[in-house]
Image (cartoon, grey):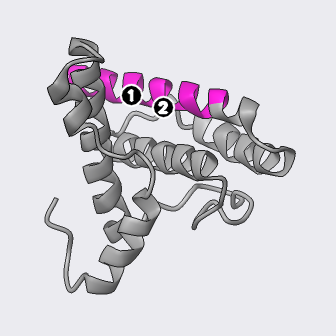
């Protein structure tokens, strides 16, 4: 379990590095709120429970998507709440897990060679995650199957 937890921490550090880099290029209003959320998520960097680490990573990934898209989505459409951060709704978490798996697979494909036909052809579009979650939310009748 420690190995898996370590992998989640490494994933979180990687995502937050991308968040910080994206914030440097963002407009001031986007940067201010993004920095507030990044700071709150960074407080969870050493959280011991694997389930909470997974949710923390998904929230960081969603924050990255919002910054890259240049528009805020729930829960990032307002300032971080006082106290503990709530976990993501199940339909959003499910969509984020799928997107994160696809994103990770695409990155592994690019590590094999950015010019390989299979790496380029199989690379998913990294944006549009929130739209996918919203469209799936309308069709969810029970718990997510991921």
Image height check: is 90 above or below 121? below
Estimate how packed mark 1 is, as few (under 14), some (14 to 19) or many (20 or more) residues with alpha carbons within 10 Å.
some
Q: Which residue is mark 2?
A: 15
Does the magenta-highlighted stretch encompass residue 11? Answer: yes
The residue positioned 46% from the left and 44% from the top of the image is: 61
The residue positioned 25% from the left and 41% from the top of the image is: 101
Does the magenta-highlighted stretch encompass residue 58? Answer: no
Side of 21 relative to 107 (left or right) = right
Residues in magenta, as a range: 1-21
Residue 55 in the image, given as x and y percentages of width and height = 40, 49
Q: CA distance from mark 2 to mark 1?
A: 6 Å
Which corner quadrant holds the C terminus? bottom left
Label disc, if present, on residue 138 of the rendered structure? none
Residue 68 in the image, given as x and y percentages of width and height = 59, 45
Q: Are marks 2 and 1 in contact (CB under 8 Å)?
A: yes
Residue 53 in the image, given as x and y percentages of width and height = 39, 40
Image height check: is 14 above or below 36? above
Residue 72 in the image, given as x and y percentages of width and height = 64, 61
Q: Which residue is mark 1?
A: 11
- Of residues 54 and 135, the one nearer the viewer is 135
Secondary structure under the numbered disc 2 in the rendered image: helix
- Of residues 112 and 60, the one nearer the viewer is 112
Q: Main secondary structure of the magenta part?
A: helix
Which corner quadrant holds the N terminus? top left
Estimate how packed mark 2 is, as few (under 14), some (14 to 19) or many (20 or more) residues with alpha carbons within 10 Å.
many
């Amino acid at each position: 379990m420690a190995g898996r937890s370590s992998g989640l921490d490494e994933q979180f550090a990687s995502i937050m590095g991308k968040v910080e880099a994206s914030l440097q290029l963002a407009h001031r209003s986007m940067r201010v709120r993004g920095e507030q959320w990044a700071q709150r998520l960074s407080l969870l960097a050493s959280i011991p429970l694997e389930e909470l680490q997974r949710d923390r990573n998904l929230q960081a990934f969603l924050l990255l998507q919002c910054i890259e898209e240049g528009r805020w989505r729930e829960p990032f459409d307002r300032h971080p709440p006082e106290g503990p951060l709530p976990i993501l709704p199940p339909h959003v978490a499910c969509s984020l897990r799928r997107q994160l798996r696809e994103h990770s697979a695409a990155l592994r494909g690019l590590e094999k060679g950015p010019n390989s036909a299979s790496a380029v052809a199989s690379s998913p579009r990294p944006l549009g995650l929130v739209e996918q979650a919203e469209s799936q939310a309308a069709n969810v009748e029970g718990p997510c199957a991921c």
